[in-house]
Image (cartoon, rainbow, N blue to C red):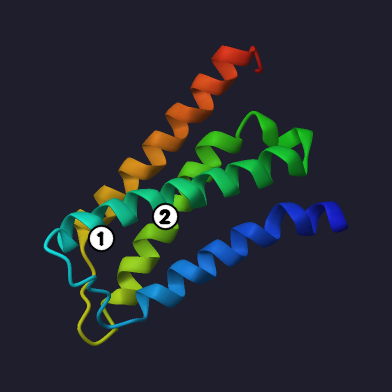
């Protein structure tokens, strides 16, 4: 049981953090590059969510190992869509298909990282 908590708790904490920050009406940094910083943040937060979800799925059961990359990618993408939907109800925020696409870049980077590690270290 503790093994599962160690695997899945980071996933839920990270997802809760994304949800929390999505509920803040103004996340402006005040910097000149604010827009770029926020879009990079989208990539990074969904890259991390994907990697945490992949790790949890892969290590939960041998049955999940083969399908953990596509399942983690799909689940992370669905979370990104739900996050944008959530933002559409927050004053000062909007839901954006473009942001989902930017989130997808983070997911794609995660998939490439996993594939590279598996290729490099001979895991299948």
Marks 1/2 in contact by CB < 8 Å: the verdict is no
Residue 82 visible in the picture: yes
- Compared across the picture, whether 92 is left or right of 23 comes to left
Marks 1 and 2 sit apart, C-alpha to C-alpha, by 10 Å
Image coordinates of residue 119 in percent, x first then y, are: 55, 14
Residue at point 51% right, 23% down? 115
- Figure disc tally: 2
Q: Which mark is residue 103?
A: none
The residue at the far left in this view is 32
100 relative to 32, above or below: above
Percent x, y of residue 54: 59, 42
Asked if residue 77 can be seen in this view, the reply is no
Q: Residue at 24% across / 87% down in the picture?
A: 91
Within 10 Å of the Cα at label 1, are there few (<14), some (14-19), or many (20+) other Cα atoms?
some
Image quarter for residue 82? bottom left
Q: Which residue is mark 1?
A: 38
Q: Residue at x 61, y 64 (%)?
A: 12
Residue at x 21%, y 64% (from the top left corner): 96
Specify whether 53 is left or right of 103.
right
Residue 39 at what x, y percent from top left?
Answer: 24, 55
Q: Quadrant of residue 20?
A: bottom left
Q: Nearer the viewer, residue 42 or 65?
A: 42
Residue 3 image position (x, y, % from top left): 83, 51
Of mark 1 and mark 2, the one earlier in the sequence is 1
Q: Which residue lies under the disc numbered 2?
A: 45
Quadrant placement of the C terminus: top right
**Is 18 on the left or on the right of 63, as rendered?**
left
């Amino acid at each position: 049981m503790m093994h599962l908590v160690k695997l899945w708790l980071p996933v839920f904490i990270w997802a809760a953090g994304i949800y929390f920050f999505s509920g803040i009406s103004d996340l402006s940094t005040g910097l000149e590059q604010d827009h770029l910083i926020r879009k990079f943040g989208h990539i990074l937060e969904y890259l991390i969510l994907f990697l945490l979800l992949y790790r949890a799925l892969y290590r939960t059961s041998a049955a999940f190992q083969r399908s953990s990359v596509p399942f983690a990618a799909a689940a992370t993408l669905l979370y990104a869509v739900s996050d944008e939907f959530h933002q559409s109800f927050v004053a000062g925020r909007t839901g954006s298909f473009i942001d989902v696409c930017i989130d997808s870049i983070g997911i794609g980077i995660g998939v490439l990282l996993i594939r590279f590690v598996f290729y490099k270290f001979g895991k299948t």
